[in-house]
Amino acid sequence: MVDEQTQAKIDTWLNGNYDDETKEKINALVANNQEELIDSFYKSLEFGTGGLRGLMGVGTNRMNKYTVGSATQGLANYLLKSFTGQVKVAIAHDSRNNSSYFAQVVANVFAANNIKVFLFDALRPTPELSFAIRHLGCQSGIVITASHNPKEYNGYKAYWNDGGQVVPPHDKNIIAEVNAINSVDDIKFSGGEALIEKIGEEIDEAYLQQLHELSLSPEAIAAEKDLKIVFTSIHGTGITLVPSVLEKFGFTNVHIVEEQKEPNGNFPTVVYPNPEEAEALSIALKKAKEIDADILLGTDPDSDRVGIAVKNHHGEFQLLNGNQTGTLLFDYLINVRKEKGLSKPNDFIAKTIVTTDLIDAIAANNDMKCFNTLTGFKYIAEVIKANEDSLSFLAGAEESYGYLIGDAVRDKDAIGSVAMICELVAYAKFKGKSLFERLAEIYSEYGFYKESLISITKKGKKGAEEIAEMMKSLRENPPLEINGSKLAALKDYQALTEQKFPSGETSSLDFPTSNVLQFITEDGSKISARPSGTEPKIKFYFSVNEPLEKTEDYDKISDKLDAKIQGIIASMGLK
């Protein structure tokens, strides 16, 4: 049954100045699919950790011309209030269905509001959009993408003048401006097209040059230039620049996965275009085995995430998770910079609160500050901006396969990360080691940290209510013992408190408010619960650790940690 508020939204669309095709689709839902109708209108899309993201279709809770237009009009109004003089924006899009169309809608709305628009002439990676904002002196930017979501989704990432995604208070202020639009007639969809300027290769060249300047070991690449590299773009934007950046770095033996080379919003060869999923890299893995590759890499549709596989100590290809790859990158950057005399006393790194604490340990051992932020790379960008006058940013990472080296880009950057990961593989090989051997050495030095993630999907309005109830229950009745280990601390990032157990002592957390809970047990295990900001899911992150006395015990300790994680999952009733 459609509630009164939802029905009012439906009536507005049916009676307002919306196109006939949209109204026909709404009427079809009214006649045939009440559940879909309700889900399409019961709420409006809001900016989450990744901006605006949702299923494509008609309605206030869907990605379409009108929700995209409304968001852009609201952002335009806010930009014009926030800046004087000519306001400029940059716009890019990925390979998804309707991405090019939505990008043009966004460009038209901005231009109709007398805002100068730099529109990429074809699909481009998200990190290049972030770079372009700073390079062109823009006040904002938009990239049309739903990152690694299924093909039915699209999205809208909004950026500020620092090249980072919008953060508080701007995100809420933009939403307020969007909510102040009372009618579709308030959206300027046309007029001012002369303010739209196409951009392309000139930005590519500047971006690639900036990435090349990050290289630390040209001598290792020269010695290992024929490193066997397998790359897949999984039908996304990576194909536009990954081959170019690898060539610029000096690698000559790159094998592109042809079956996934062409950009295609239907992502026909995978279930999900997500390099976090083993299935998405299965074709590339087959290719890597065929040619006995040194490394396999795959980027998601908008090329802000990268997944990799290397040979383990058994000579078998193993997919590394985001925590492992991030750890290896940080270890390489810190140690090689130290080795070459490039380290600065004010160097710092940043990561999210659900990313491995092993990175904190590495930073502490090197007397380097490590900032922890909320989930969402926009918060890492915020830390960079807040400290750019006093500290020197080295790198950032989040467990969901996102990394950034240097500060010319202010979002996770799979293009630069691919090049740097290949460089660290070449460096390890140059030193007579494999990447996996280096990872085992890190574990033996700092402890074997192992992480895992499970996502529980709860779709629609009912699902959102169930997720809210799960978080409420965990807050009000936290488990005082998890897998046989007593609860030592509970961090509540919504209440911004940390409670110690069993004393009950409470202290404050210095973070923005976020609906996240972290349970830390006496044995050092950490469990984080967090509803996704971009998908109908609640995510549970698990982190456990044990000493690794000698690398020969790798398998034994790995199995022990796996068992511990499974014990935690069972103990919390998440199976």
Image (tube, rainbow, N blue to C red):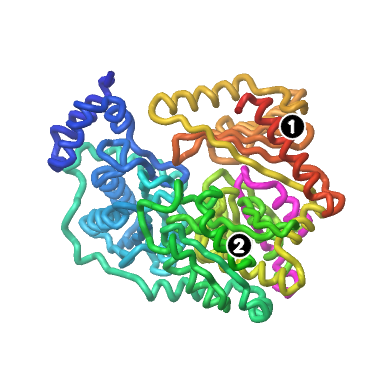
The quarter of the image holding the C terminus is top right
Task: Using the image, determine if residue 122 lies above or below residue 494.
Answer: below
* 35 on left or right of 441: left
Q: Position of residue 528 (x, y in %)?
A: 62, 35
The answer to whether residue 398 is visible is: yes
Task: Using the image, determine if residue 519 lies above or below residue 260.
Answer: above
Binning the other alpha carbons within 10 Å of mark 1 as few (below 14), some (14 to 19) or many (20 upward) gives many
* 140 on left or right of 59: right
Per the image, is 500 magenta? no
* 300 on left or right of 545: left
Q: Which of marks 1 and 2 is in front?
A: 2
Task: Using the image, determine if residue 91 lies above or below residue 274.
Answer: below
The answer to whether residue 379 is visible is: no
Q: Where is residue 249 in the image (x, y as percent from the top left)?
A: 56, 76
State yes or no: discs 1 and 2 in contact (Cβ < 8 Å).
Answer: no
Binning the other alpha carbons within 10 Å of mark 2 as few (below 14), some (14 to 19) or many (20 upward) gives some
Mark 1 element type: strand
- Which range is magenta? 338-366
Q: Which residue, as the protein is rendered here, is positioned at the far right?
A: 549
Q: Where is residue 313 in the image (x, y as percent from the top left)?
A: 75, 57
Q: Residue at x 83, y 46 (%)?
A: 547
Q: Which amino acid does label 1 sit on?
A: Thr
- The numbered disc on residue 521 is 1
Q: Earlier in the sequence, mark 1 or mark 2?
A: 2
**Mark 2 lies on residue:** 289
Task: Using the image, determine if residue 45 lies above or below residue 425.
Answer: above
- Labels in figure, total: 2
Work out how far the residue at label 1 is from the one at label 2, CA to CA, in angstroms: 41 Å
The quarter of the image holding the N terminus is top left
Q: Which amino acid does label 2 sit on?
A: Lys
